[in-house]
Amino acid sequence: MLPLKLLFRDWRGGELALIATALVLAVSCVTAIAHFGDRLTRAMHIQSQTFLAAERVVRSSRPVEEAWLDAARKRGLQQAETVSFASMLSAGEQFQLAAIKAVSGAYPLVGQLEMRPEPSAASRAVEGGPAPGQVWLEPRLLPLLNLDIGDPLQVGDAELTVSGLLDHEPDRSDNLFSMGARVLINLGDLAATNTVQPGSRVRYRYLFAGDDTALEDYFNWLEPQLTEHQRVIDLQEGQPRVASALERAESFLYLAGSLAVLLASVAVGLAARRYSLRHTSYVAVMKSLGAGRGQVLRIYLGQLAGLALLATAAGLLIGSVIQAQAVSLMADFFPAEPPPSRAQPLLVGLVTGLACALGFALPPLTRLARTDPMQTLRRDWSNPDRREWLGLVLGPTSMLLLIWWLSGDIAITLALFAGMALLVGGAALMNQLLVRGRLANLGGAWRIALGSLQRRAAFNTLLIAAFGTGLLAMLALVFARTTLIEEWRMQLPENAPNHFLFNIAPHDAEGMEAMLAEHNVTSTEFYPMVRGRLVAINDIPAKEYNEGSERVGALRRELNLSWTENLAPDNRILEGQWWDETDEGVSVEVELAARLNLALGDQLRFSIGGLEVEAPVASFRSLDWNSMRPNFFMIFAPGTLEDFPATYITSFYLPPEKKLFVNELVRQYPSVSLIELDKIIERIRDTIGQVSLAIESVMALMLVAGVLVLIAGVRASIAERLQEAAIIRTLGGRRRLLVQSLLVEFGLLGTAAGLLAAAGAELTLAVLSQRVFELPFAWHPLLWLLGPVAGALLVGTAGTLACRSSVSQPPLKVLRELA
Amino acid sequence: MSVVLRAENLHHCVATGEGPLTLLNDISLQLARGESLAITGASGSGKSTLLGLLAGLDVPTGGRIWLAGEEITAMSEEQRAAVRARCVGFVFQTFQLLPGLTARENVMLPSELRGERGAAKRAEEFLARVGLEHRLHHYPRQLSGGEQQRVALARAFCSIAGDGSENHGILFADEPTGSLDAGNGDKVIDLLFQLNAESATTLVLVTHEQRLAERCQSHLRMAAGEIEIAGSAPGDSLSEVSA
């Protein structure tokens, strides 16, 4: 009972409230992020499975051995199969190229097909694809082929009956570059169509789902047997880019959250130290009355445990509420319906609470137990125990382990600590500049403020670093979100293409070019495109050509191969020859060439639809991916790839007032695919806005944690400040002078923190500009103005408010109490 | 009369930046149950250090001490704390009440530290004996200096009252009137000796005040860490307590 009694009675002292507030802040911040991250990860997992229509897929350009499928069956795995290819459909006099997909009965294993039995019916989810003899069409094919439900449709040699309209297939994204509109048939009818012949461009997908262990076992067995024509697609690859951006945002949130936790922990440490000092006399008395070291330890550990548990519970609750709000606000940006919260993230919050409390509050309290009872007789309440190594080791170690655990990356954790050390070094330098300056010559309030700064140099360094961290993160984020993105948009060429057209059939290309010209829409060149895989370099399998080659993304997927006589305006030959000087070979994008360690003249072998093509490297070419024009890693000399079935790609700029032209274009060419970049940019801006909102909220928590550090530090010196203020007032100093000196003291500290933050933010923006946005370095003068002003206002106000009791109490009362 | 406090050849040195500093040199004494001893001397003479060593708050660098029949110089810190909890009470110059606890809770503190039942009732009894039954729920900041020291007296006697069996309790008082005006000081002294007589406790006090020292049965004047004068009354030789 005694620990709890002391806990409740001591609340007025302020340190316990401060410790509790800092713990609540740290726990709620991390709990909210952990919940959010957990739900996001699970949503991405669900979505990835849906995108694959399975848990894992083997993709192949030819049928796989039956033994492989038998092995899966023996392991109890569910299995389905799809075969995709392009083929002409005919209905009476009408013909149309379409993307045909033949599916087995179990397809899809994850996710659902949605179809309509009639054009006017509502779309509904169905189990399995069309029955044998039936075909489902993408709705736009009906008018193109002049068909109705129930009509016969010729697919190759087979006549099938149109029995439904296909609205959605889970693995549709796999079809982005496929030719034409989708047609779904039963796998049993495939042979009868006679469309798949040796050399046909066909994609076989073998879908698997089932028990995790059985899947793992099966793929461990299967993967060594795969050839270059086969590839396993797992959940990671099923994720779309927006989801991975959100995932990066989650990591960033964790890092920002970790900084908030670090600052809150410093506040906990300062408050606990103050509490420990204030309780030295209590413990000395208790020991005089017969309390042993163990008993004192039990009393104070009991207090800490009670406080930490209450604060952690409150933090868990608040964090859970915050994340629920955040998820509902951002639900639209989740890749799938956000799954419900679960208990695991609460563990993250709990561990955070314990790490903060044990790492930072435990050492001062354990030191308390070593108080010498003779101090009651000496009436000396300084803490004579100088063995602070426990605090110096335990606090940083617990934070290091916690942040490592949260981020899952020791390199990032160490970088964060190194950054913090740099920041503390910068803060110490700022502090030196402040106290060594000649500001004291400015007069009374300045002299008092400077005196105070000189006496509290260590704390001031901590304060500048704490606020510097919060302000730096806030400034860098706000400027990155506004200025950098705007600068990036500004550097895009005027009238940069904002629409991409692809999957253009060769026979449509000419008509489409004419239509664009007729409507005064300027497009880039129509580039032919053939899909192929780079399989060998100088007769060595490409993935083995260099150490690390297997990690090069371009070798793990099919590339878009093109050919053209004209070098695009944003392309530049850096080495070798273009087609005006040579008539054979392939021009390779310079960064990919560097990753693959290619030299001019190296022989590259490509596998295209089962056939192989070889070409020497003729040149290395730089290009601008931001030009919004079609660009290619590999451009062949004209005449090399013409025999392969190609589609075309182009891009064009459409001003907003001509937007309706898109409808006309799609109506006339329903089989082409269109990407409206303007809409995507808008969507990206919305996503960044929402993600930034979440990150900025965490940054705000960092600033709150900074305020807690300030309050904790001020409370540590409040007795001293009270005495100084009382003496100055007794000697005739006015209250106004004291308030001014506080404003100057904390204003200067805030300015220093703001300058440090501006320098750090400018550095961060410089790195972001060059690495992410590929922009030249530019100064941000507003940053250098905003940082110090915001710092001075924030720290000046918070510090003066925290010290207000030192100037508001009557000096006689203060001096009597201190005596 | 049974001896409750005995010290033999006490030496105490502390390390300083300029080498070891001797605080006490060759001190021996013994006190029987119910006796009172005043320790006087100039500032820095070592009287508070001696008080602390006799009460087991610290251990001397040389010599031996027996408190309530047990040699505390051979004990660990925890064992000495247990002896203090059982039979030592303290009154300090600056009262040393815990500001977050009420008068009653401050008096209950020693019993609570010992884990005894009925602490509240006993605290109320002792507060009534010092005339503060109407101040049970007041915090130290709401009490005058004299009242605070009376609460401290109640706490000290409650601390050594134990469970009512034979009392080996010793009350150590360090300048108990040092922070009080003359009127309040007299009241506290009267109360101290009255309670001491009622409880048959042994009293060791450090004081600068002649009139307080005169009320003790024995007197020990210290200078530079050594006994200058010891006697049954101030200024007299005190053969029975000196070795």
Image (cartoon, coloured by chain):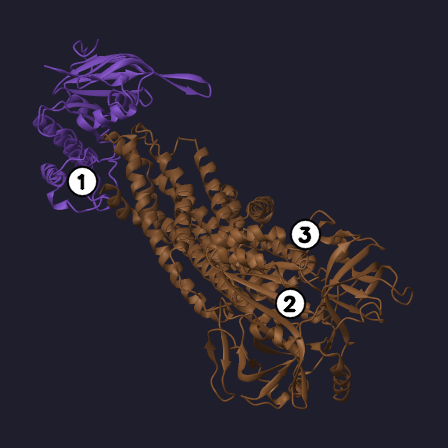
Chain colours: A brown, B purple
* A693, above or below A291, in the image: below
Please name the residue that numbered disc 2 is placed on. A203
Report the quarter where the C terminus of chain A lies: top left
- Chain letter for the residue marked with disc 1 in the picture: B
Please name the residue that numbered disc 1 is placed on. B147
Horizontal side of A526 relative to A422 (left or right) equals right
Q: Nearer the viewer, mark 2 or mark 1?
A: 2
Image location of residue A316, percent across then percent down: 37, 56
The amino acid marked with disc number 3 is Glu
Question: Can the viewer see residue B1 in this picture?
Answer: yes
The amino acid marked with disc number 1 is Glu
Image location of residue A135, percent across then percent down: 56, 80
Image location of residue A521, percent across then percent down: 74, 84
* A297, above or below A219, in the image: above
The amino acid marked with disc number 2 is Arg
Please name the residue that numbered disc 3 is placed on. A550
Badge 2 density bin: few <14, some 14–19, many ≥20, Cα 10 Å:
some
Residues tagged by mark 1 and mark 3 found on one chain of the structure:
no
Distance, label 2 to label 3, CA atoms, is: 22 Å
Image location of residue A669, percent across then percent down: 68, 84
Find numbered disc 1 in the image and state the secondary structure of the residue it sits on. Answer: helix
Find numbered disc 3 in the image and state the secondary structure of the residue it sits on. Answer: helix
Q: Nearer the viewer, mark 2 or mark 3?
A: 2
Report the quarter where the N terminus of chain A lies: top left
Question: Can the viewer see residue A717 in this picture?
Answer: no
